[in-house]
Image (cartoon, rainbow, N blue to C red):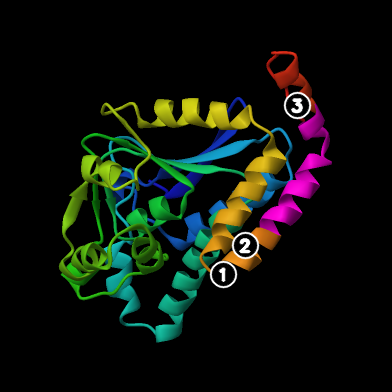
Amino acid sequence: MTAELRSTFEGSTMVLTIHNPEHRNALGPEMYAAGVEALNAAESNPDVRCVVITGEGETFCAGGNLQRLQANRLKAPEVQAQSIEALHTWIEAIRAFPKPVVAAVEGPAAGAGFSLALACDLIVAARNAVFVMAYSSVGLSPDGGGSWSLARALPRQLATELLMLGERIGAQRLHELGVVGRLCDAGQALGTALDWAARLGARAPNVLTSIKELLGEAGAHDLPAQLALEREHFVKNLHHANAGIGIAAFLSRQTPRYE
């Protein structure tokens, strides 16, 4: 059965589904390229307001394919380096994508699968979902930006525990820590994510783009620099047509319909 990243549409939401059931939705280079291509298409399509990334069936993503990694040990190091570069290109594309990206997680999200979920702007997870940075259990270190994301989302000691010991952490605990935004019953992650995406899609897309950029830049800026960036975005958005639509709708107690 071919491993692939499937692209479908639900209203104004593009759904990217990791489909590799034979290997518990393990990732591979063909998916990385497809992910970047799909995001490029979604960025230029005004009808797409949000993207949801999920896994086929009861598993979000088992991370890397260990059989492929074992085979790569017999090849030149550049082979694996190129594969990781392709993954990282997809991760960077998700972070730079100007529209919201929501992860819908059922079951395990392991290794690069955990990193992939963390790269998304928002995470919906079934209550029985389990997240694990499994790399150290097989003599490997993390990829996919997992160390970067966890270092910013969690206390250093907890991030260290997850990365060094490969400890499993449940969706409920990550929800309490603020990493998982929504919990749902098993089998409902995609539906819950689509509902969330529809709510996001009803808001002014230029404003969501500004918020994503502001959040992305905040960690690298001191307060004066961040204030200057906020000023630039605010003035730009005030003079966008959607501000006129939103303000008029609020004053007339109507529901805005943004462009």
The amino acid pointed to by label 2 is Gln
Relative image position of residue 26 (x, y in whole percent): 34, 54
Find the magenta span and give its range. 229-244
Tell me, for residue 226, which label it has, or none: 2
Whether residue 33 appears in this view of the structure is no
Q: Secondary structure at mark 2?
A: helix
The residue carrying pointer 1 sits among few (fewer than 14), some (14 to 19) or many (20 or more) residues within 10 Å by Cα, namely few
**Label 3 belongs to which residue?**
247
Tell me, for residue 22, which label it has, or none: none
Relative image position of residue 186 (x, y in whole percent): 26, 29
Asked whether 193 or 84 is in front, the reply is: 193
| Residue 180 drawn above or below residue 74 | above
What residue is drawn where x is 40% and y is 85%?
Answer: 77
The amino acid pointed to by label 1 is Asp
What residue is drawn where x is 72% and y is 54%?
Answer: 231
Quarter holding the C terminus?
top right
Asked whether 36 or 222 is in front, the reply is: 222
**Label 1 belongs to which residue?**
222
Relative image position of residue 29 (x, y in whole percent): 47, 62
| Residue 49 drawn above or below residue 37 | above
Disc 1 from disc 2: Cα separation: 6 Å
Mark 1 and mark 2 residues within 8 Å of each other at the beta carbon: yes
Q: Secondary structure at mark 1?
A: loop
| Residue 109 drawn above or below residue 106 | below
Magenta segment includes 220: no
